[in-house]
Amino acid sequence: MDLLRKIYDTVICYEEDTIEMCKRVDEELLDLIEPYKGKLSDDELDKLKDLMGCISATAEREGFLLGVRYTLKMLYALMDDNLK
């Protein structure tokens, strides 16, 4: 898994599709934070944005890893079925 994390961190996260996905996620985060404007101080709001951003980045990376894992499992199953 460490190799896949390195691939994500050094290659995949810079791909155009990933950058576009991150922009959409950032827009969603801003929408989720909107109700807290005026209720939280600017410092608290910044901390909330940072926290949600970290959670989002972790979820994106873990989603990539899960997708690779399931893709490999499917390929293995398909190859195994074809060999029978």
Image (cartoon, rainbow, N blue to C red):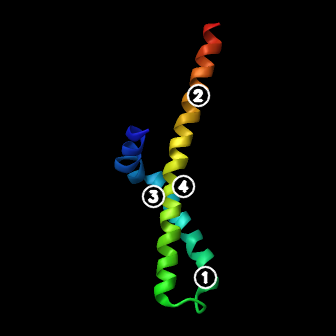
The residue tagged 4 is: 59
* Amino acid type, residue under disc 1 in the picture: Glu
Mark nearer the N terminus (2 vs 3):
3
**Is the residue marked by circle 1 packed among few (<14), some (14-19), or many (20+) residues within 10 Å?**
few
Q: Give x and y (percent) for residue 61.
A: 48, 51
* Amino acid type, residue under disc 2 in the picture: Lys
- Quadrant of image for the N terminus: top left
* Cβ–Cβ under 8 Å for marks 2 and 1: no
Provide the secondary structure element on which disc 4 rests.
helix
Residue at the image position 57 percent from the left and 21 percent from the top: 76
Residue at the image position 52 percent from the left and 58 percent from the top: 21
**Is the residue marked by circle 2 packed among few (<14), some (14-19), or many (20+) residues within 10 Å?**
few
* Cβ–Cβ under 8 Å for marks 2 and 3: no
Residue 73: assigned label: 2
Provide the secondary structure element on which disc 1 rests.
helix
Up the image or down, 41 lies above or below 7; here it is: below
Q: Give x and y (percent) for residue 51.
A: 50, 70
What distance separates the C-alpha of mark 4 from that of mark 2? 21 Å
Provide the secondary structure element on which disc 3 rests.
helix
The residue tagged 1 is: 34
Residue 19: assigned label: 3
Up the image or down, 15 lies above or below 1; here it is: below
Mark nearer the N terminus (2 vs 1):
1
- Judged from this view, the residue extending furthest toward the top is 84
* Amino acid type, residue under disc 4 in the picture: Ala
